[in-house]
């Protein structure tokens, strides 16, 4: 008699990893927060094995660091490291915008694909000034991710996606003021306008300038926070 396949739940390692990642990114687990395998296992109601594997993955991603006998701690937000990441993203965002505009010019962008980017822009601009920072960050990430997908180059989206947790940890520092939010979304609108008009040179230049400025603003604010601390 044949046996039916078991319906296994998602891998515990992935679940533990995702739960810890979310808590680190949204600040629930702040920089310097100490974590132990036993403590995490007890909180999540799992064994130590998936916790151990998840911790190793997060260490490789630079989100957790060893703390000797103390176990591991949530990694600090390193302004210099983040600026390096923004410089890489500057090049990728510029390339993505150029590719998007080139595809528009060649008639390779479908109405549905363009609508996704326009929708992300509309949502971001419409967010109320008193919205939670997490909502503002989600909208910002959604806009840039839509542009990455619109470029047709999957490597761009995949490369940046791996680093989004590092960017998200610090984005709230830049989006904390109303003036900054208004400027950011005005720049997003200009980038998308250039893309949809098929102007690859302008789209690339605006996208690179936008990301470069974001990196500088973020690094500067992290330095201020560090000095106060």
Image (tube, rainbow, N blue to C red):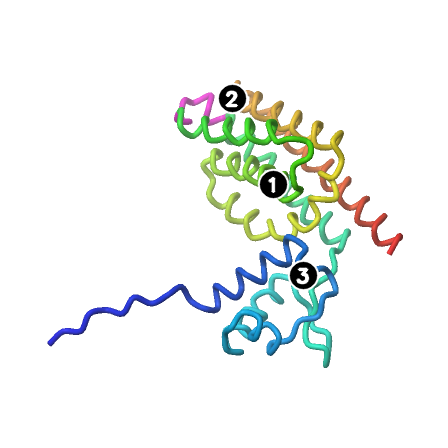
Residue position for label 1: 135
**Earlier-in-chain disc, 3 versus 1:** 3
Disc 1 packing (10 Å; few <14; some 14–19; many ≥20) = few
Circle 3 — which element?
loop
Q: Helix, strand or loop at disc 2?
A: helix
Query: Is the C terminus in the top left, top right, bottom left or bottom right quadrant?
Result: bottom right
Q: Position of residue 8 (x, y in %)?
A: 33, 67
The residue indicated by pointer 2 is 196
The boundaries of the magenta stretch are: 102-110
* Earlier sequence position, callout 1 versus callout 2: 1
Q: Nearer the viewer, residue 229 or 204?
A: 229
Q: Is residue 223 left or right of residue 186?
A: right
Instruction: Give the image quarter of residue 95.
Output: top right
Circle nearer the viewer, 2 or 3: 3
How far is disc 3 from disc 1 in space, using C-alphas? 18 Å
Element type where label 1 sits in the image: helix
Find out whether residue 182 is within the magenta segment.
no
In this rendering, is residue 68 above or below 179?
A: below
Residue 154 at x, y percent in the picture: 46, 43
**Could you say which is closer to the camera, residue 190 or residue 174?**
174
Q: Nearer the viewer, residue 98 or 213?
A: 213
Q: Where is 45 relative to 193, above or below?
A: below
Q: Which residue position holds label 3?
A: 29
Image side of residue 179 versus residue 50, left or right: right
């Amino acid at each position: 008699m044949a046996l039916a396949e078991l319906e296994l739940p998602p891998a515990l390692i992935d679940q533990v990893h995702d739960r810890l990642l979310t808590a680190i990114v949204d600040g629930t687990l702040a920089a310097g927060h100490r974590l132990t395998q036993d403590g995490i296992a007890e909180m999540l109601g799992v064994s130590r094995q998936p916790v151990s594997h998840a911790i190793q993955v997060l260490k490789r991603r630079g989100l957790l660091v060893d703390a000797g006998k103390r176990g591991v701690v949530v990694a600090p937000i390193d302004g210099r490291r983040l600026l390096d990441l923004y410089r890489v993203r500057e090049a990728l965002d510029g390339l993505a915008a150029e590719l998007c505009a080139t595809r528009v010019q060649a008639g390779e962008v479908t109405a549905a694909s363009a609508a996704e980017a326009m929708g992300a822009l509309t949502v971001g601009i419409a967010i109320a000034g008193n919205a939670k920072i997490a909502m503002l960050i989600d909208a910002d990430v959604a806009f840039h991710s839509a542009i990455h997908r619109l470029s047709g180059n999957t490597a761009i989206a995949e490369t940046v996606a791996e680093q989004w947790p590092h960017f998200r940890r610090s984005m709230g520092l830049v989006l904390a003021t109303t003036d900054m939010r208004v400027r950011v979304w005005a720049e997003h609108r200009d980038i998308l306008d250039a893309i949809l008009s098929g102007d690859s040179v302008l789209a690339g230049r605006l996208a690179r300038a936008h990301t470069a400025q974001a990196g500088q603003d973020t690094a500067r604010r992290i330095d201020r926070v560090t000095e106060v601390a």
